[in-house]
Image (cartoon, grey):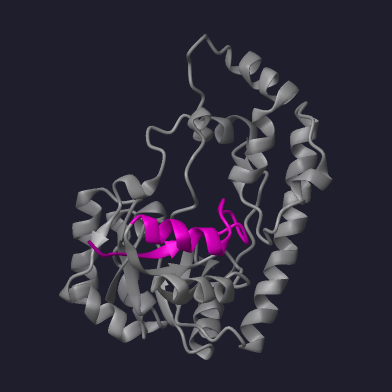
Amino acid sequence: MKYIDLHLHSYYSDGIYSPKDLVKKAKKEGFSIISLTDHQVIDGIKEAIKEGKKYRIKIIPGVEINTRFKNYSFHLLGYGIDLKNKELNLVLEKMQNERKKNVEKCIFQLKNQGFEIEENKVFKTPSKDIGLGWITSFLYQGKNWKKIKNDFKLKRGQIITLPEIYKKYFLINGKEILSPSQIPFERAVSLIKKANGLVVLAHPSQQLSWSDDWLFPILKKKGLDGIEAISSHHNWSNIEHYQKIAKELKLLITIGSDYHGDLPLKWGFPIKSLWQYFKIEINKEIKKLIAVLS
């Protein structure tokens, strides 16, 4: 069996594994085509490509960029990008620096809430775009965990999930204390195109409802090449819905699990890994997609 996954993250952004280990795991799980799409980071792609050659796994260079369009926040995936493109690298570096400042502000806010966090330990990671999961991991330790159990009045055997942690401690008066670094949608499209890449909207149901479908023709005119219709963030209705939109607008249909790594059981998620259920077999339609990306 051969599978494809065009949305993966390594420890260079908010994933758990190194690109090298990620490729090894993908091989073990039966994947033959993957794309490393770290948030605002392309540092791990060369490592992934090198490891991919050992295991005969095709690695498509990718990146995920946080963007804003009108009142919407979109994640754009750039595929087949030129890693040496100077403009792309400069903008990504600027976004990484902004993210670091936002993480510092987040740590300050968490300390104000009574958590004990050593900033140097938070930044002791290869990540250039530190994610919520990494920061939260420090809350599941020692006195911080005792505080959480007291705040939630946890009973024996009760599991506290990451979304609950986020809602209670990372939202203050409805405002996020860990702000994302974003650039305008049009700017991100331009960067990806100049780097000879294809522009794909990641997991649309995360940011949109079906009443927002009027946006897609506009986004296409602004350079959108495809929609990640088949996503772990989508239920079957959403998968069907966004495939329909893509076909009507003659946009590419892409496939991505948004895999960040196997999850600690204490986080309360019902599955260990997205790959337990997210494996799409390569077929004729997917081969067409790969031909375009290649």
Nearer-the-camera pick, 177 or 136: 136
Does the image show residue 78? no
Q: Residue furthest top?
A: 156
Residue depicted at 67% across the width and 42% down the height: 135
Residue 242 vs 58, above or below: the answer is: above
Residue 117 vs 148, above or below: the answer is: below
Tell me where residue 59 sits by quadrant.
bottom left
Residue 55 vs 289, above or below: the answer is: above
Residue 27 rendering spot, x and y as whole percentages = 39, 61
Residue 89 rendering spot, x and y as whole percentages = 66, 80
Residue 14 lies in the magenta-colored region: yes
Q: Count the numbered circles shown.
A: 0
Residue depicted at 54% across the width and 86% down the height: 82
> Is residue 155 left or right of 128 when viewed as pictured?
left
> Is residue 144 left or right of 247 when viewed as pictured?
right
Residue 167 rendering spot, x and y as whole percentages = 56, 33
The quadrant the N terminus occupies is bottom left
> Is residue 14 left or right of 111 when viewed as pictured?
left
Identify the magenta region. Answer: 1-29
The quadrant the C terminus occupies is bottom left
Residue 57 lies in the magenta-colored region: no
Does the image show residue 163? yes
Tell me where residue 227 sits by quadrant.
bottom left
Residue 256 rendering spot, x and y as whole percentages = 36, 61
Tell me where residue 26 sits by quadrant.
bottom left
Residue depicted at 48% across the width and 21% down the height: 159
Q: Residue furthest front?
A: 54
> Is residue 292 left or right of 244 when viewed as pictured?
right
Residue 148 vs 289, above or below: the answer is: above
Residue depicted at 43% across the width and 33% down the height: 269
